[in-house]
Amino acid sequence: MNINFKKETFRDDFTFSNSPEAVRRFPFPFHEDKYMYAVNMEPHVPAGPPGHAYNNPIDVDEHYLSEMEDRAKVLKEDPLRYQALAHMMAAQWDTLELLMEQQAASYPEHFSLTKNGDNWHWINRPMGIDQKFIFGNASTLPLEPLEFITRQAQGDFVIVDQRDNNLWCDAGMVTTQADWSLDFDIGMNFMEWHGPVPLAHEMGVFDRALKFLLNLQQGKPVRRLNWTMTINARLDTSPENYATWGKDRMTVTPDNVGDKVHLRCELQSLWRLPRSNAILFVIRCYLIKMEELVTIPKWGRRFHRVLRDLRNELADYKGLTRYRATTVEWLAKYDDGAATSPGIFPE
Amino acid sequence: MLVKGIKSRPTYNGITLNPAARKHLVALEAEGAEALLEQSQSANSEEWSKSEILFVATSATAADYEQKMAALKANNVWQAPTIPILLNRLSAVLSKSHMGTCLYVSGTEGFIGQVMQVAMNHGIDPASIKTEHRGSEARRVQCVHCKGFTDNVRTSPYTCPHCGLSLLVRDHYSRRLGAFQGVCIDAEEPGTAPTPEVMFP
């Protein structure tokens, strides 16, 4: 399966868009016509119609090269978006192995990994990278293992260490985040790191999620979907740059909703790592424009209902308040009141 | 909007001396001294003889505290002229400390946070450090945009002295940085920042 990698931007002129195939493979995050927090975890096994984002455990799509270019720009401006505490080196190697193996297994025409004992050979054809190195010897790579591989994999990556019956956010590559700061949160435990999320603590969601994740088994990754909305196709909606992108939220009008307003879905997958016993938390961001979303009639109907009925605290926390009404009004044209089928996939 | 009850917000549970400790290392800022002095009756002379006290005064009452602490007959009482000097001394003491040393901190949140940073850099589990908040509610805040720290922030919003943005002070707290988070309050509509209000007297 050859992927036709697009050349596009996620800043300035925002030339990002989804091909019709990319629209159909989008991991639409609502399985019913309403939304409330839930632990909503399921085994991360291949699923969905052919071509769907769920087909491969580590998904590579048409935005790969442009996303990697955007990540490199973010890191040049602010190197603190990549950080790993000193005790996380074993987990860094675990992650490098996992991402190389998964990408090579799912996309052999684009990636290959050859192992001869600890002498490894990694080829990333789309990015033109050919690297021989000794697994476990950081001096044989141009960057720390986690930074090296996450500059070549879509999505944000957080490695959480497990100790004291808790999970600790102790390493990460975070450049496509929904408004949270790795630099501020690194070193925090699971509850602290999720501290600012409203309602969910009181609902017991984090207690249940933590209990579940502490028992996560190797070879049995799990996934869940999370979502928010973003104005313009900006991957880097970081708190660091909020003063740059915050004002975009004031620019939504009834005429530009279709192009400017994006549903932002996070496909989160969690993997127990073999040597370190840490957990790799992959937070893969997918963007879709409202005008692309409504090409799938089920999604147009459903998202109209979800957004219209969303609790105000959640809308505030997700930062939707300023453009929610305009977007709901625009979406209403695509909701004829018909029933929608269960599940997230297109009809 | 200041979101209350954020789980990363530290709690301070008091600095009662633990008799099982081999040594008490106590870092105190101004009114924080009272948290220790209040134990002058309950703790016996053996506890005081195991104690090393590092103290920084930031108010006119310094001399008064100094006298009262001398009366405790601690193994050592040392007074620093400023917080950074105290932190240097603490680091030096910790580098020569042994198992069984118990660390106690009392003062403003900014002081407690900075002492904990030094201690964590010496490998002390932050959960084992005894803390007590005394004195003003002023906060140490990091601007999430330019990463500049500001001590003794009393208002929200406040103007970041490093980059000039008007910052909302959140309850979200980083132990690693020893600071609360400050986020631009008028990013969406520049120029609409509300008048600063004293939130942390």
Image (tube, helix red, strand yellow):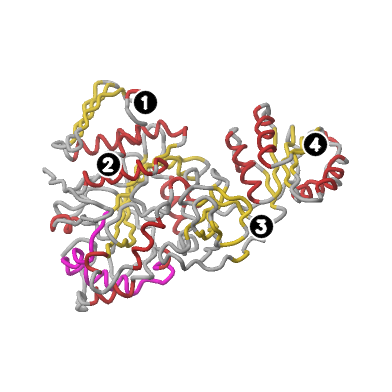
**Relative to A305, does residue B62 appear above or below in the rendering?**
above
Mark 1 surroundings: few (<14), some (14-19) or many (≥20) residues within 10 A = some
Spatial CA distance of label 4 from label 1 is 47 Å
Q: Which residue in the structure is indicated by mark 4?
A: B77
Q: Which residue in the structure is indicated by mark 2?
A: A153
Protein chain holding label 3: B
In the picture, measured across the screen, residue A342 lies left or right of residue A241, that is: left
Protein chain holding label 4: B
Query: Which three-letter amino acid code belongs to the residue tagged 2?
Result: Ala
Spatial CA distance of label 1 from label 2 is 19 Å
**Relative to A117, does residue A31 appear above or below in the rendering?**
below
Q: How many marks?
A: 4
Q: Position of residue A53 (x, y in %)?
A: 21, 51
Secondary element under disc 4, as helix, strand or loop, is strand
Q: Which residue in the structure is indicated by mark 3?
A: B137
Protein chain holding label 2: A
Protein chain holding label 1: A
Q: Quadrant of residue A35?
A: bottom left
Query: Which three-letter amino acid code belongs to the residue tagged 4?
Result: Val
